[in-house]
Image (tube, grey):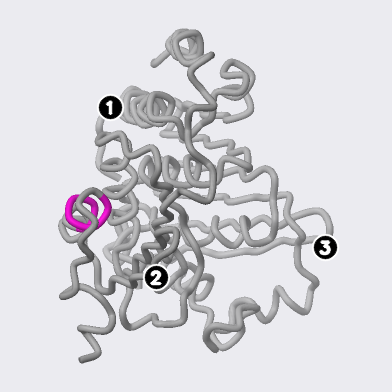
Amino acid sequence: MKSLEELKAIREKMQGQIGIRNESSEQTRVIVGMATCGIASGARPVLTALSDAVQNKGLTNVAVIQTGCIGLCQFEPIVEVLEPGKDKVTYVKMTPEKALEVIDQHLIHGQAIKKYTITEVLG
Amino acid sequence: MMTEISLNVLDIANNSIRAEASLIEIIIQIQRDLDSLTITIADNGCGMTAEQINKVEDPFFTTRTTRKVGLGVPFYKMAAESTGGSFKIESTPGIGTKVVAMFGLSHIDRMPLGDMNSTVHTLITLNTQIDFLYRYIFDRKEFTLDTREFREILNDVPLNSPEVSAYIKEYLQENQHETDGGCLV
């Protein structure tokens, strides 16, 4: 069994480091729809891919959060990206692979991927 | 339809979150001698009146305003009942809600349990304001994850910090493997 001792070691390592995380209005929010419609369409692996990538790439100014039904069930899994001072970008019919592209191109390089957005899909 | 039962669990637990629970308990119990898989999801959220409980199994009832249907509970109930199992909701306003689903373990129509660890990990790291008690029981063996216990050790180190999140993932995987020996449920 994995022991709680390891957790103590993590606390000792981490204490003093916390508070660095940026919680201000500067933060970019990545919102994943996690209602029945989203989950049934595959939102859980999309959410996992996003939070893993944000952690692994050390994107401290990005928060991955979940929300309920956005009201566009036929386009789930839906991921919304809200950057401070910019218009909301809504990505539809997401997959973990597309989500990783969004991390690289949109969140890291600042270029939204038009072909995955709702405006493109709706034509 | 959900492709694995762990997705139903994630969906139903989200109802507890909406009900503003501060503690959500999820128990997975596999009993091979009784050929059953029993899943209990209990919360201390706002609860429901008897009238609401009757309505919640109806796909055309929802408290949400974004759409007119609510399929979470009906999907879950159907998944359980189609395996010769049973489904029950108990709830008291102001006290909380408990949803118990029993599945026929070897029934051909039972969906795989799927990645419960991913469901639990997602719930814990995305809802750090809520405590979770997860119990995984496989025949006579079991393991427990209690975020209250974790929080006590961690002090103010958040459950969603990268190191702790990775620890939770490993904790779930290693302990599940030791409990069920890697048996695919």
Kindly identify the residue that appears in the image at 70 percent across and 45 percent down.
B22
Magenta range: A102-107
Q: Residue at x 47, y 49 (%)?
A: A26
Position of residue A58 in the picture relative to residue A64 (left or right): left
Q: Position of residue B55 (x, y in %)?
A: 67, 81
Specify the principal SS of the magenta part: helix
* Earlier sequence position, callout 3 versus callout 1: 3
Residue situated in front as seen by the camera: A49 or A39 = A49
Assess disc 1: are there few (<14), some (14-19) or many (≥20) residues with their C-alpha within 10 Å of its C-alpha: few
Asked if labels 1 and 3 touch by Cβ distance under 8 angstroms, the answer is no
> Which quadrant does the N terminus of chain B fall into?
bottom left
Q: Residues within 10 Å of mark 2 (few under 14, many from 20)?
A: few
Residue beneath the point at 38% across and 69% down:
A38
Amino acid, disc 3: Pro
Residue lying farthest right? B94
Mark 3 vs mark 1, CA separation in Å: 40 Å
The location of residue A84, given as percent across then percent down, is 44, 58
